[in-house]
Amino acid sequence: MKAAYKADRGRGIEIRDLPVPEISEKEVLLKVKVAAICGTDIHLYEWSGWCENVKAKNPMIIGHEVCGEVVEVGSQVSKVKVGDLVAGETHIPCGNCMLCRTGKEHICKDLKILGVHTDGVFAEYVKIPEVCAWKLTEGTPPEIGAIYEPFTIAVHGVLKDKIGGCSTAIFGSGPIGLFAIGVASVCGADPLFAVDINDYRLDLAKKMADNVITLNPTRDDVVGIIKDRTNGYGVDVAIELSGSVKGTQDAFASLRKSSRICLVGLQAEDVTLNLVRDITYKEATVYGITGREMFDNWYTAEKLINSGRINIKPVLTHEFALDEVEKAILMAKEGKCGKPYIRVSK
Ligand SMILES: [Zn+2]
Ligand SMILES: [Zn+2]
Protein backbone atom coordinates (compact mmCIF):
# COMPACT_ATOMS: atom_id res chain seq x y z
CA MET A 1 0.00 0.00 0.00
CA LYS A 2 0.97 3.62 -0.46
CA ALA A 3 1.84 5.52 2.74
CA ALA A 4 3.45 8.78 3.93
CA TYR A 5 6.50 7.52 5.78
CA LYS A 6 8.83 9.29 8.20
CA ALA A 7 12.03 7.33 7.59
CA ASP A 8 14.36 9.11 10.05
CA ARG A 9 14.68 12.03 12.46
CA GLY A 10 15.42 14.57 9.75
CA ARG A 11 12.95 17.07 8.30
CA GLY A 12 10.53 15.73 5.70
CA ILE A 13 8.27 12.88 4.68
CA GLU A 14 8.28 10.43 1.77
CA ILE A 15 5.71 8.35 -0.05
CA ARG A 16 6.58 4.65 0.12
CA ASP A 17 5.12 1.34 -0.82
CA LEU A 18 4.64 -0.65 2.41
CA PRO A 19 2.84 -3.83 3.42
CA VAL A 20 -0.80 -3.61 4.52
CA PRO A 21 -0.83 -3.92 8.36
CA GLU A 22 -1.81 -7.27 9.90
CA ILE A 23 -4.38 -7.05 12.66
CA SER A 24 -4.55 -8.91 15.97
CA GLU A 25 -7.74 -10.22 17.62
CA LYS A 26 -8.81 -6.88 19.14
CA GLU A 27 -7.89 -4.69 16.17
CA VAL A 28 -9.71 -3.35 13.14
CA LEU A 29 -8.33 -2.72 9.65
CA LEU A 30 -9.57 0.45 7.95
CA LYS A 31 -9.46 1.36 4.30
CA VAL A 32 -8.75 5.06 4.67
CA LYS A 33 -11.17 7.40 2.92
CA VAL A 34 -10.16 10.81 4.26
CA ALA A 35 -7.36 11.87 6.62
CA ALA A 36 -6.88 15.41 7.91
CA ILE A 37 -3.76 17.38 8.74
CA CYS A 38 -3.13 18.46 12.34
CA GLY A 39 -0.50 20.58 14.09
CA THR A 40 1.00 17.35 15.41
CA ASP A 41 1.81 16.31 11.84
CA ILE A 42 3.80 19.52 11.38
CA HIS A 43 5.88 18.63 14.47
CA LEU A 44 6.49 15.14 13.12
CA TYR A 45 7.32 16.47 9.66
CA GLU A 46 9.87 18.90 11.14
CA TRP A 47 10.86 16.42 13.85
CA SER A 48 10.74 19.21 16.47
CA GLY A 49 11.85 18.83 20.09
CA TRP A 50 8.24 17.94 20.92
CA CYS A 51 8.68 14.60 19.11
CA GLU A 52 11.54 13.58 21.40
CA ASN A 53 9.64 14.84 24.48
CA VAL A 54 6.65 12.62 23.74
CA LYS A 55 8.90 9.74 22.56
CA ALA A 56 7.29 9.61 19.11
CA LYS A 57 7.90 6.44 17.12
CA ASN A 58 10.54 6.61 14.42
CA PRO A 59 10.50 5.48 11.68
CA MET A 60 6.76 5.38 11.11
CA ILE A 61 3.72 6.28 9.02
CA ILE A 62 2.33 9.60 10.30
CA GLY A 63 -1.21 11.04 10.51
CA HIS A 64 -4.03 10.47 13.02
CA GLU A 65 -7.25 12.23 12.01
CA VAL A 66 -9.13 9.67 9.98
CA CYS A 67 -12.35 8.37 8.53
CA GLY A 68 -12.32 4.94 6.94
CA GLU A 69 -14.32 1.85 6.12
CA VAL A 70 -13.85 -1.29 8.19
CA VAL A 71 -12.50 -4.00 5.87
CA GLU A 72 -11.36 -6.59 8.43
CA VAL A 73 -11.96 -7.21 12.13
CA GLY A 74 -10.08 -9.34 14.68
CA SER A 75 -11.71 -12.44 16.18
CA GLN A 76 -12.61 -10.63 19.43
CA VAL A 77 -14.01 -7.45 17.90
CA SER A 78 -17.73 -6.97 18.57
CA LYS A 79 -18.46 -3.22 18.37
CA VAL A 80 -17.92 -2.72 14.64
CA LYS A 81 -18.22 -4.93 11.58
CA VAL A 82 -16.92 -5.04 8.01
CA GLY A 83 -18.53 -2.29 5.95
CA ASP A 84 -19.01 0.18 8.84
CA LEU A 85 -17.82 3.74 8.33
CA VAL A 86 -15.79 4.81 11.35
CA ALA A 87 -13.90 7.81 12.69
CA GLY A 88 -10.68 7.25 14.60
CA GLU A 89 -10.32 8.09 18.28
CA THR A 90 -6.61 8.78 18.54
CA HIS A 91 -6.14 8.19 22.27
CA ILE A 92 -5.06 4.58 22.75
CA PRO A 93 -5.68 3.86 26.46
CA CYS A 94 -4.18 0.90 28.33
CA GLY A 95 -7.59 0.02 29.77
CA ASN A 96 -6.11 -1.16 33.09
CA CYS A 97 -4.70 1.81 35.01
CA MET A 98 -6.52 3.75 37.73
CA LEU A 99 -7.35 6.59 35.31
CA CYS A 100 -8.76 4.24 32.68
CA ARG A 101 -10.85 2.52 35.33
CA THR A 102 -12.32 5.81 36.60
CA GLY A 103 -13.59 7.23 33.31
CA LYS A 104 -10.43 9.11 32.40
CA GLU A 105 -9.13 6.94 29.57
CA HIS A 106 -8.13 10.03 27.58
CA ILE A 107 -5.50 10.83 30.20
CA CYS A 108 -4.47 7.20 30.77
CA LYS A 109 -1.22 6.81 32.67
CA ASP A 110 0.28 4.93 29.71
CA LEU A 111 -1.58 6.72 26.94
CA LYS A 112 -0.42 6.17 23.37
CA ILE A 113 -1.46 8.33 20.43
CA LEU A 114 -2.31 6.97 16.99
CA GLY A 115 0.15 8.31 14.41
CA VAL A 116 2.59 9.39 17.15
CA HIS A 117 3.36 6.17 19.02
CA THR A 118 1.89 3.79 16.44
CA ASP A 119 1.77 3.79 12.65
CA GLY A 120 -0.73 6.39 11.45
CA VAL A 121 -3.37 7.10 8.88
CA PHE A 122 -1.69 8.82 5.93
CA ALA A 123 -1.87 5.51 4.12
CA GLU A 124 -4.29 3.41 2.11
CA TYR A 125 -4.87 1.16 5.14
CA VAL A 126 -4.41 1.54 8.89
CA LYS A 127 -5.04 -0.77 11.82
CA ILE A 128 -6.53 0.63 15.01
CA PRO A 129 -7.61 -0.96 18.31
CA GLU A 130 -11.36 -1.66 18.50
CA VAL A 131 -11.72 0.89 21.30
CA CYS A 132 -10.59 3.62 18.87
CA ALA A 133 -13.22 2.88 16.21
CA TRP A 134 -16.19 5.26 16.50
CA LYS A 135 -19.01 4.07 14.27
CA LEU A 136 -20.43 7.02 12.35
CA THR A 137 -24.06 7.62 11.46
CA GLU A 138 -24.79 6.25 8.00
CA GLY A 139 -24.43 8.92 5.33
CA THR A 140 -21.79 10.95 7.22
CA PRO A 141 -19.49 12.50 4.59
CA PRO A 142 -16.00 10.98 5.11
CA GLU A 143 -14.39 14.42 5.31
CA ILE A 144 -16.68 15.23 8.26
CA GLY A 145 -15.89 11.85 9.82
CA ALA A 146 -12.18 12.66 9.58
CA ILE A 147 -12.56 15.82 11.68
CA TYR A 148 -14.65 14.36 14.51
CA GLU A 149 -11.44 13.92 16.48
CA PRO A 150 -10.36 17.61 16.55
CA PHE A 151 -14.02 18.72 16.73
CA THR A 152 -14.47 16.76 19.96
CA ILE A 153 -11.56 18.69 21.53
CA ALA A 154 -13.53 21.90 20.95
CA VAL A 155 -16.63 20.23 22.41
CA HIS A 156 -14.57 19.26 25.47
CA GLY A 157 -13.30 22.80 26.11
CA VAL A 158 -16.47 24.75 25.35
CA LEU A 159 -18.88 22.44 27.17
CA LYS A 160 -16.66 21.77 30.18
CA ASP A 161 -18.87 24.14 32.16
CA LYS A 162 -21.73 26.60 31.66
CA ILE A 163 -21.83 28.28 28.23
CA GLY A 164 -25.48 29.18 27.41
CA GLY A 165 -26.00 32.91 27.84
CA CYS A 166 -22.33 33.43 28.68
CA SER A 167 -20.18 36.13 27.15
CA THR A 168 -17.29 34.17 25.67
CA ALA A 169 -13.91 34.92 24.13
CA ILE A 170 -12.11 32.31 22.09
CA PHE A 171 -8.40 32.99 21.63
CA GLY A 172 -7.00 31.34 18.49
CA SER A 173 -8.96 30.65 15.28
CA GLY A 174 -7.06 27.64 14.03
CA PRO A 175 -9.21 24.60 13.20
CA ILE A 176 -10.06 23.75 16.83
CA GLY A 177 -10.71 27.43 17.58
CA LEU A 178 -13.08 27.57 14.61
CA PHE A 179 -14.91 24.50 15.85
CA ALA A 180 -15.08 26.06 19.32
CA ILE A 181 -16.65 29.22 17.87
CA GLY A 182 -19.35 27.12 16.19
CA VAL A 183 -20.05 25.05 19.32
CA ALA A 184 -20.13 28.10 21.61
CA SER A 185 -22.49 29.97 19.31
CA VAL A 186 -24.93 27.10 18.77
CA CYS A 187 -24.97 26.49 22.55
CA GLY A 188 -25.92 30.08 23.27
CA ALA A 189 -22.72 32.02 23.97
CA ASP A 190 -23.18 35.77 23.44
CA PRO A 191 -21.50 38.10 22.87
CA LEU A 192 -18.91 35.85 21.29
CA PHE A 193 -15.41 37.09 20.47
CA ALA A 194 -12.85 35.38 18.21
CA VAL A 195 -9.25 36.56 18.52
CA ASP A 196 -6.46 35.76 16.06
CA ILE A 197 -3.60 37.52 14.28
CA ASN A 198 -4.49 35.74 11.02
CA ASP A 199 -7.17 37.54 8.97
CA TYR A 200 -7.78 34.53 6.72
CA ARG A 201 -8.81 32.59 9.81
CA LEU A 202 -10.90 35.45 11.21
CA ASP A 203 -12.85 35.39 7.93
CA LEU A 204 -13.46 31.67 8.50
CA ALA A 205 -14.56 32.48 12.07
CA LYS A 206 -17.38 34.60 10.61
CA LYS A 207 -18.56 31.54 8.65
CA MET A 208 -18.79 29.52 11.87
CA ALA A 209 -21.17 31.82 13.76
CA ASP A 210 -23.43 34.75 12.85
CA ASN A 211 -22.87 36.49 16.16
CA VAL A 212 -19.07 36.37 16.28
CA ILE A 213 -17.08 39.57 16.81
CA THR A 214 -13.60 39.15 15.34
CA LEU A 215 -10.58 40.88 16.88
CA ASN A 216 -7.04 41.02 15.57
CA PRO A 217 -4.48 41.94 18.26
CA THR A 218 -2.14 43.39 15.61
CA ARG A 219 -4.58 46.31 15.28
CA ASP A 220 -7.29 45.93 17.97
CA ASP A 221 -7.04 46.57 21.70
CA VAL A 222 -8.45 43.11 22.42
CA VAL A 223 -8.87 43.34 26.19
CA GLY A 224 -10.19 46.94 25.99
CA ILE A 225 -12.83 46.07 23.39
CA ILE A 226 -13.93 42.92 25.25
CA LYS A 227 -14.30 44.95 28.48
CA ASP A 228 -16.25 47.66 26.60
CA ARG A 229 -18.65 45.17 25.09
CA THR A 230 -19.29 43.46 28.43
CA ASN A 231 -20.20 46.58 30.44
CA GLY A 232 -16.72 46.77 31.86
CA TYR A 233 -16.87 43.32 33.47
CA GLY A 234 -14.97 41.09 31.06
CA VAL A 235 -16.16 37.74 29.75
CA ASP A 236 -17.83 34.90 31.65
CA VAL A 237 -15.83 32.33 29.69
CA ALA A 238 -12.49 32.34 27.90
CA ILE A 239 -11.16 29.44 25.83
CA GLU A 240 -7.42 29.60 25.15
CA LEU A 241 -6.52 27.90 21.88
CA SER A 242 -3.83 30.20 20.50
CA GLY A 243 -0.95 28.52 22.27
CA SER A 244 0.75 31.92 22.33
CA VAL A 245 2.05 33.73 25.40
CA LYS A 246 0.26 36.97 24.52
CA GLY A 247 -2.99 35.18 23.69
CA THR A 248 -2.92 33.37 27.02
CA GLN A 249 -2.18 36.53 28.99
CA ASP A 250 -4.94 38.40 27.15
CA ALA A 251 -7.34 35.52 27.83
CA PHE A 252 -6.76 35.89 31.58
CA ALA A 253 -6.94 39.69 31.37
CA SER A 254 -10.32 39.43 29.56
CA LEU A 255 -11.97 37.41 32.33
CA ARG A 256 -14.52 38.99 34.64
CA LYS A 257 -14.65 38.07 38.31
CA SER A 258 -16.19 34.64 39.01
CA SER A 259 -15.50 33.34 35.50
CA ARG A 260 -13.90 30.28 33.96
CA ILE A 261 -11.09 29.72 31.53
CA CYS A 262 -10.24 26.53 29.63
CA LEU A 263 -6.63 26.13 28.57
CA VAL A 264 -6.45 23.98 25.43
CA GLY A 265 -3.63 25.49 23.34
CA LEU A 266 -0.06 24.29 23.87
CA GLN A 267 2.36 27.10 24.66
CA ALA A 268 5.92 26.31 23.63
CA GLU A 269 7.27 28.77 26.21
CA ASP A 270 6.54 29.47 29.88
CA VAL A 271 3.75 32.03 30.41
CA THR A 272 4.05 34.68 33.12
CA LEU A 273 0.83 35.46 34.97
CA ASN A 274 0.10 37.42 38.11
CA LEU A 275 -1.82 34.74 40.00
CA VAL A 276 -3.29 37.13 42.55
CA ARG A 277 -4.60 39.55 39.92
CA ASP A 278 -5.46 37.02 37.19
CA ILE A 279 -6.96 34.15 39.21
CA THR A 280 -7.23 34.56 42.99
CA TYR A 281 -8.90 37.98 43.19
CA LYS A 282 -11.14 37.03 40.27
CA GLU A 283 -12.13 33.73 41.84
CA ALA A 284 -11.57 32.33 38.36
CA THR A 285 -11.89 28.62 37.67
CA VAL A 286 -9.08 27.29 35.48
CA TYR A 287 -9.52 24.05 33.56
CA GLY A 288 -6.77 22.23 31.72
CA ILE A 289 -8.18 20.45 28.69
CA THR A 290 -6.35 17.78 26.74
CA GLY A 291 -7.89 15.70 23.98
CA ARG A 292 -11.44 14.54 24.55
CA GLU A 293 -13.34 12.49 27.07
CA MET A 294 -14.04 8.97 25.93
CA PHE A 295 -16.73 8.94 24.98
CA ASP A 296 -18.90 11.71 26.43
CA ASN A 297 -17.53 14.28 24.02
CA TRP A 298 -18.07 11.93 21.05
CA TYR A 299 -21.76 11.47 21.82
CA THR A 300 -22.19 15.23 22.18
CA ALA A 301 -20.25 15.90 18.97
CA GLU A 302 -22.43 13.43 17.10
CA LYS A 303 -25.63 15.04 18.39
CA LEU A 304 -24.42 18.51 17.45
CA ILE A 305 -23.36 17.49 13.95
CA ASN A 306 -26.43 15.35 13.25
CA SER A 307 -28.75 18.13 14.48
CA GLY A 308 -27.72 20.13 11.43
CA ARG A 309 -27.51 23.25 13.61
CA ILE A 310 -23.76 23.50 13.31
CA ASN A 311 -21.90 23.38 10.00
CA ILE A 312 -18.24 22.45 10.44
CA LYS A 313 -17.51 22.15 6.74
CA PRO A 314 -16.06 25.68 6.30
CA VAL A 315 -13.05 24.53 8.36
CA LEU A 316 -12.11 22.09 5.58
CA THR A 317 -10.54 24.45 3.09
CA HIS A 318 -8.12 22.50 0.89
CA GLU A 319 -8.23 18.96 -0.51
CA PHE A 320 -5.10 17.00 -1.45
CA ALA A 321 -4.23 13.50 -2.69
CA LEU A 322 -2.10 11.05 -0.67
CA ASP A 323 0.93 11.83 -2.86
CA GLU A 324 0.63 15.45 -1.77
CA VAL A 325 0.87 15.00 2.02
CA GLU A 326 4.00 17.16 2.17
CA LYS A 327 2.28 20.00 0.32
CA ALA A 328 -0.70 19.76 2.69
CA ILE A 329 1.52 19.82 5.79
CA LEU A 330 3.43 22.85 4.51
CA MET A 331 0.16 24.65 3.83
CA ALA A 332 -1.03 23.94 7.38
CA LYS A 333 2.27 25.27 8.67
CA GLU A 334 1.97 28.49 6.67
CA GLY A 335 -1.53 28.96 8.11
CA LYS A 336 -3.34 30.46 5.15
CA CYS A 337 -5.98 27.75 5.40
CA GLY A 338 -8.48 26.15 7.70
CA LYS A 339 -7.73 22.46 7.82
CA PRO A 340 -6.17 20.79 4.75
CA TYR A 341 -7.24 17.18 4.24
CA ILE A 342 -6.24 14.17 2.18
CA ARG A 343 -8.75 12.28 0.03
CA VAL A 344 -7.18 8.81 0.09
CA SER A 345 -9.98 6.83 -1.54
CA LYS A 346 -13.57 7.30 -2.67
ZN1 LIG B 1 -4.96 16.14 15.70
ZN1 LIG C 1 -4.73 3.44 31.35
Image (cartoon, rainbow, N blue to C red):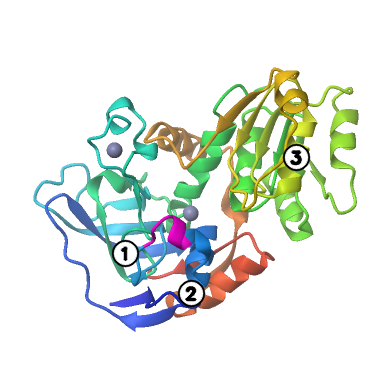
Task: Based on the picture, tell me whether residue 287 belongs to the magenta stretch.
Answer: no
Q: Can residue 163 be seen here?
A: no
Quarter that holds the C terminus: bottom left
> Which residue is labeled 3 in the image?
249
Closer mark to the observer between disc 2 and disc 3: 3
Which mark identifies residue 325? 2
Q: Is residue 227 left or right of residue 270?
A: right
Task: Based on the picture, tell me whether residue 54 belongs to the magenta stretch.
Answer: yes
Q: Residues within 10 Å of mark 2 (few under 14, many from 20)?
A: many
Label 2 sits on what residue type?
Answer: Val
Q: Can residue 243 be seen here?
A: yes
Establish if 17 lies above or below 288: below
Establish if 119 lies above or below 111: below
Closer mark to the observer between disc 3 and disc 1: 3
**Looking at the image, which is closer to me, 161 or 104?**
104
Nearer-N-terminus badge (1/2): 1
Q: Quadrant of residue 293?
A: top left
Question: Alpha-carbon distance for marks 1 and 2?
Answer: 15 Å
Q: Is mark 1 within 8 Å of ligand 1?
A: no
Q: Which residues are magenta?
A: 51-56
Residue sitting at x 61%, y 41%: 180
Label 3 SS: helix
Label 1 sits on what residue type?
Answer: Asp
> Which residue is labeled 1 in the image?
119
Closer mark to the observer between disc 1 and disc 2: 1
Q: Quadrant of residue 327?
A: bottom right
Q: Is mark 2 within 8 Å of ligand 1?
A: no
Nearer-N-terminus badge (3/1): 1
Label 3 sits on what residue type?
Answer: Gln
Label 1 SS: loop
Quarter that holds the N terminus: bottom left
